[in-house]
Image (spheres, rainbow, N blue to C red):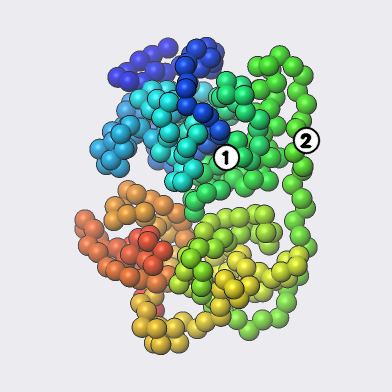
Amino acid sequence: MKRSGNFIEMDRKEFFEWLINEKVTRKITHTQEHHTYQPDYDDCGRYSNLQLVLNMSNYHRNTRGWSAIAQHITTFKDGKIVVGERSFNSNPAGIAGHNSGGICMEHVGYFDKGKDSMTEEHKKTIAFVTAALHFKFNLPVNTQTCVYHTWFASKTCPGTNFFGGNTKADAIKYFYPVVEKELAAMKGVSYKPTSAPAPKPAPTSSKVNSSVTHIEVITASLWTYNSPDWDDKAIVVNDGEVFTVTEKIKVGGGYMYKLKSGLYITANEKYVKPTTLKKQSVEKKKELVEVTVNSLWTYASKDWDDKELIVHKGEVFTIVGTYKVGGGTMYKLKSGLYITANTKYVRKLK
């Protein structure tokens, strides 16, 4: 066990003993799984675990303006665990609108596909810590009590490759059984899979003829999908955003458009409408910007470090403002996000 400031670093055994003896008066209803994105595994080689947490605390308090570090628990690639500063009797700053009753875990790393490959020690610790929390607070393991950040926000967190994926179906199939095995061992009983239904098979899909080349979102916010499957949610898009359509597909009892980015979106005209870029920019006098590279970060604020979500080549967004940020320029989008104005990465549509 090591200490630095308000933080304590522990191994799994030390953490379990500490947790069992921790007095928590707040009602706990769920646990939250997050990845940090930054810092990532490369940073673990440059800084100690405690220094990384101190750095996060400094950023959260002095830049984000929070009273303490956002999370209750931080886990690391070497399997170690750090707690401190954020009391278990305080809600976390983890998921906007869903923090009440939550215990927030930040797993240091960037667990999207093609990024950090989670170590075996880290996997063991994540499953162990999650199980220990569910043991301590007598919580079952399901999609209401053990949640991923991405289910509530347009982020990939805790990563598209977090224990096999970041959808609810992935959690049920890959993550929950590992947690339940740990939980059963803590209870001293034999592991039995829960009665939660297996993910239903993806609905059948078939291509249909369509002349639509672009669509505009006409509702406040709308899910996109990773595949032609209504359960395979990806990210949320917003009113006024325009996307390039490559094909229309019948999916179960409804229809989807496949977008140039590779994502899918409903074709229901309650939520989207066909449009043309030229007609829209003239008639509505909107300034539009199109992404011209394969993938590009957007930002939650006018801050190059405040990365939010990735957008893709061919996606089009409505500009509502232009700002000088440091040595560069950002566009503010109708969604409230910001994007670079650098013509190496985006182009204005006329």
Does dot 1 land on a helix, a strand or a loop? Answer: strand
According to the picture, the residue beneath numbered tag 2 turns out to be 195
Judging depth in this view, the residue of 311 and 68 nearest the camera is 68
Residue sitting at x 38%, y 51%: 307
Q: Is residue 347 left or right of residue 184?
A: left
* Residue at the (68%, 16%) spot, across then down: 187
Horizontal placement of 343 versus 293: left or right?
Answer: left
Q: Which residue is mark 1?
A: 147
Q: Quadrant of the C terminus?
A: bottom left
Vertically, is 304 above or below 287?
above
- Say how many tags the image has: 2
Above-or-below relation of 115 to 303? above
Q: Nearer the viewer, residue 111 or 236?
A: 236
- Give the residue displayed 62% in from the left and 47% down from the top: 167
Q: Is residue 187 visible in this depiction of the protein?
A: yes
Q: Position of residue 331 (x, y in %)?
A: 32, 66
